[in-house]
Amino acid sequence: MLQKLWIICMTAIIISTSSCEKHIFGLEHENDPIGNFESFWSEFNQMYGLFQVKNIDWLAIYERYRPMVNESTTDPELYEILVEILEIIDDGHIVLVPAGTDLPMYTGGPIGRIDTLQDFDLEILKQNYLVDPKETDFAMLYDFVEEGIGYVHIDHFGDGEKAFDQETRQLLDYFKDAKALIVDIRGGSGGEDIAGKTIASHFTDQRRLYMTNRIKNGPGPNDFTAPAEWYIEPRGDFQFTKPVVLLTNRQTISARETFELAMVTLPNVTTVGDTTSGAFSNLVTRELPNGWGYSMSIGDWRAADGTSYEGRGIPPQIVVQNRRSDLLGGRDEALERAIVLLR
């Protein structure tokens, strides 16, 4: 269900915003098979931020696939060509919506290849591990999973620095006497990097660099903005510096991953679960002349040490891949491993 909701949201964003953005950037092509292909290739050439990271020769892609398109190319044929190109890029932030046709929507990256919902279900977790779960007004569910060990699930990382600051203060005040905390970022969609930065700043005792990013700003392969540095620094009346386990899975994507980049700079944090999705960059939505919408990553996001996890995800320190059969039986093995580690 969470995956379907994410896809629906992405589709809505593409349909509602891509036309406006096309007008802003002013890249105009004819509404015919060749014009649609040229529009697609040119937009990616100008704005896609990860060709170097993924070691993709975009000009070679053009030379290989452009001859496949002519005036008689049908919509299904054009769709198959574009999907084949997108499979080479393999980006979890790419969605292609062939509006006005019966063709299926394409979703890139792990979310498009596997059912990432097989290993996590918040309702099952609530029924079997939480006695009296509470919810903040904006984005968090929390409770004790056993004496001295707190648990919080972050539902989303939507825009709202003030809201996340207030909710994290509320959360940590509730757990101020806890000996340890489990922070669960499995499930759900992405959001805004500032949300994760705000939350993580309540867990650090000093200023720490955790991420850099640069944005594609021209058609040349090296046309990027100067790298911006992202820091967390102590926030709130006190910071939670006791042991923390961060739970992740393949559904952990985008702003959830940049939040993880911040949290893993802390010496008291251990990551447990599965490798994350591997889609960090911000995205834009675009539209082909024929009305098909799509999204693309526009930048190069890296960990503090310069490592890019795009396309491969952040591996956990302790791998625990939940089995669907265990989950349906009421057992979340990753959560149980976290509890054992913190006892």
Image: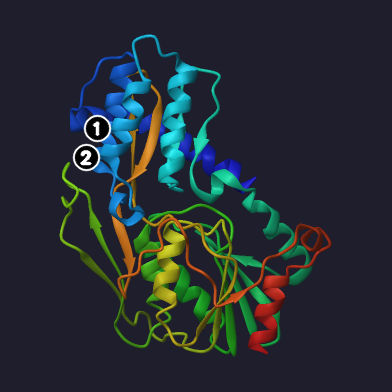
The residue shown at (54%, 50%) is 110
Residue 48 relative to residue 311: left or right? left
Image spot of residue 169 (x, y percent): 45, 75
- Amino acid residing under circle 1: Ser
Q: Name the one closer to the observer, 17 or 34.
A: 34
The type of colouring in the image is: rainbow
* SS type, badge 2: helix
- Amino acid residing under circle 2: Gln
* SS type, badge 1: helix
Compared with 147, 316 (above or below) is above
The residue shown at (21%, 22%) is 28
User: Of all residues shown, which one is farthest toward the right?
Assistant: 329
Specify the quadrant of the image occupied by residue 43.
top left
Image spot of residue 211 (x, y percent): 31, 69
Image spot of residue 312 (x, y percent): 47, 60
Residue 168 relative to residue 122: left or right? left
Compared with 266, 77 (above or below) is above
Mark drawn on residue 46: 2
Please report contact status of discs 2 and 1: CB closer than 8 Å, yes or no. yes
Image spot of residue 305 (x, y percent): 31, 75
Q: Name the one closer to the observer, 22 or 88.
A: 88
Instruction: Assign the C terminus to one quadrant of the image.
Output: bottom right
- Residue 85 can be seen, yes or no: yes
Q: Name the one closer to the observer, 56 or 213.
A: 56
- Classed neighbour count for the residue bearing mark 2: other residues with Cα under 10 Å, few (<14), some (14–19), many (≥20): some
Q: Which residue is mark 1?
A: 42
Instruction: Give the total of numbered labels.
Output: 2
Compared with 120, 86 (above or below) is above
